[in-house]
Amino acid sequence: MKLLENKVALITGAGRGIGQAIARKYAQEGADVAITDLKIDETVEAFIEELKAMGVRAKAYASNAAEFDAAHEVVNQIVADFGHLDILVNNAGITRDSLMMRMTEQQWDAVINVNLKSAFNLIHAATPVMMKQRQGSIINMASVVGVSGNAGQANYSASKAGMIGLAKSIAKEMGSRGVRANAIAPGFIITEMTNVLSEDVKKQWAQQIPLRRGGTPEDVANVAVFLGSDLSSYVTGQVISVCGGMNC
């Protein structure tokens, strides 16, 4: 039996990068997969067909996770389409980097709304379903900078620190109902977001990492499988760093 067989997972912001890697790994482990993104284009539709070819149900939903009503609507639709919801991965995220003295209110609000408020919205919508089932796993995508902070990323770091605090709080509130909540804190992961950096910058990053390489989206997805599966049935309120040792 596969690790996630008979489970339904919702991954936000799964049109690319880490979210897409998690969706693919979940399907490989037998989960039915619902993904959301702002826009469902041909690339996302092709990805859905790739998931279906693995023998699972899969569907993409155009939804803005940062909007409260939209989050509730998409969760209700997913439950109607799939019958239940067992795993929620709050992965949607953006960056708007700037030093604090130059950061605009719009840059701050955009990052907090997409990265943190979206998680509140989805958890608010999903937990009644999970509590009724008396089981569920919520996974917040945080970051090592949510633990350590980072110059030029006050908004991003604050949003990711919030994701950690949110997961720990939900773990305490919902544990008696069988709902677990944890956070993953990736370090330097090679994605479209980091590919804009120069090769020199990437090499400098690698030298700061004990494993001497950047991580892959699959490295993060493997931990998401663990947290979504029954292998972690006694794990809640935790932060697991996937950083090659850079934050040890």
Image: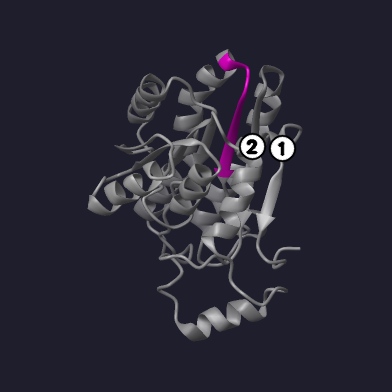
Give the quarter of the figure containing the N terminus: top right
Q: Which residue type carries mark 1? A: Ser
Residue 63 lies left or right of residue 158; in this view the side is: left
Q: Is residue 120 magenta?
A: no
Viewer-side residue, 50 vs 40: 50
Quarter of the figure with residue 133: top right
Query: Does the rendering let one see residue 165?
Result: no
The secondary element bearing badge 2 is classed as loop
Q: Position of residue 79 (x, y in %)?
A: 41, 22
Question: Which numbered marker is on residue 81?
Answer: none
- View extreme (top): residue: 132
Q: Which residue type carries mark 2? A: Ser
Q: Position of residue 180 (x, y in %)?
A: 66, 30
Residue 50 lies left or right of residue 7; in this view the side is: left
Tell me how far mark 2 sits from mark 1, CA to CA.
6 Å
- View extreme (bottom): residue: 200
Viewer-side residue, 94 vs 33: 33
Give the quarter of the figure containing the C terminus: bottom right
Residue range in magenta is 133-140
Q: Position of residue 163 (x, y in %)?
A: 57, 43
Q: Residue at x 40, y 26 (%)?
A: 75
Q: Is residue 208 above or below residue 168?
A: below
The secondary element bearing badge 1 is classed as helix
Quarter of the figure with residue 81: top left
Q: Is residue 112 above or below residue 205?
A: above
Question: Which numbered marker is on residue 232?
Answer: 1
Residue 57 lies left or right of residue 185; in this view the side is: left
Label 2 with label 1: CB-CB less than 8 Å? yes
Residue position for label 2 = 229
Viewer-side residue, 60 vs 158: 60
